[in-house]
Each structure stands twice: as structure tokens, then as C-alpha cells.
Amino acid sequence: MRFSYNKLWKLMIDKGINKKSLREMSGISATSVAKLGNGGNVNTEILLKICTALNCDVGDIMQIVPDDNDKDV
């Protein structure tokens, strides 16, 4: 299983926000945005800052998805 931030990118498109604007609004670093772009791990504080800036819930910006190599149980 892994995290997917596709919901975040869709929400940003819907609100007309680019990555630079997200960084400025939330006070997160470019490194954190890059980690999100790669589906990497970020601190929950980063997620809280994003949710606060976008006025949304964590479930609105991320989801857990199976890896390609995960087998059905």
C-alpha cells in the first residue's frame, strides 16, 4: 500500500492553485511539494498546513492505494 496525492492535485486544479501558490499559502517547502509529487512520505504537520490553507480535510487531499505488486488477500 502507498499514499496517493492525486486528490490534492485535482483540488488544486479545481481551485486554480499552482504548486508555488500552495507553498506560499501553506508555508511548506519546495522539498515537501516534491515529495508529495513523488508520492513520498511527508510529516503530518505538512498535511495539516495544506489542509488549513485549502480549508479541507486530509481525506480530501490523499488516499491509500494498493501497490502494483500487492496481491489480493
Image (cartoon, rainbow, N blue to C red):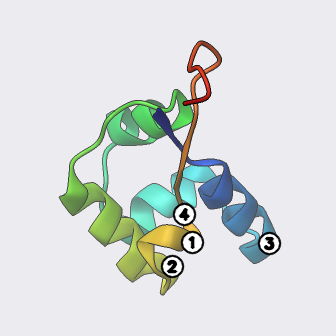
Q: Nearer the viewer, residue 69 or 35?
A: 69
**In this view, 2 is above or below 54:** above
Residues at marks 2 and 1, CA–CA distance in whole angstroms: 10 Å
Q: Earlier in the sequence, mark 3 or mark 2?
A: 3
Three-letter amino acid code at the position of disc 2 = Leu
Q: Residue at x 74, y 60 (%)?
A: 10
- Check contact, mark 4 vs mark 2: CB within 8 A: yes
Residues at marks 3 and 2, CA–CA distance in whole angstroms: 11 Å
- Check contact, mark 1 vs mark 4: CB within 8 A: yes
**In this view, 56 is above or below 29:** below
Report x, y in % for residue 67.
Answer: 57, 24
Three-letter amino acid code at the position of disc 1 = Asp
Residues at marks 1 and 3, CA–CA distance in whole angstroms: 12 Å
Three-letter amino acid code at the position of disc 3 = Asp
Which image quarter holds the C terminus?
Answer: top right
Which residue is label 1 attached to? Answer: 60
Which residue is label 2 attached to? Answer: 54
**In this view, 48 is above or below 33:** below
Report x, y in % for residue 46.
Answer: 28, 57
Residues at marks 1 and 4, CA–CA distance in whole angstroms: 4 Å
Residues at marks 4 and 2, CA–CA distance in whole angstroms: 10 Å
Which residue is label 3 attached to? Answer: 14
Secondary element under disc 3, as helix, strand or loop, is helix
Q: Quadrant of residue 16?
A: bottom right
Mark 2 neighbour class, 10 Å CA radius: few under 14, some 14 to 19, many 20 or more: some
Secondary element under disc 2, as helix, strand or loop, is helix
Mark 3 neighbour class, 10 Å CA radius: few under 14, some 14 to 19, many 20 or more: few
Which residue is label 4 attached to? Answer: 61
For residue 18, side relative to residue 34 (left or right): right
Q: Earlier in the sequence, mark 4 or mark 2?
A: 2
- Check contact, mark 3 vs mark 4: CB within 8 A: no
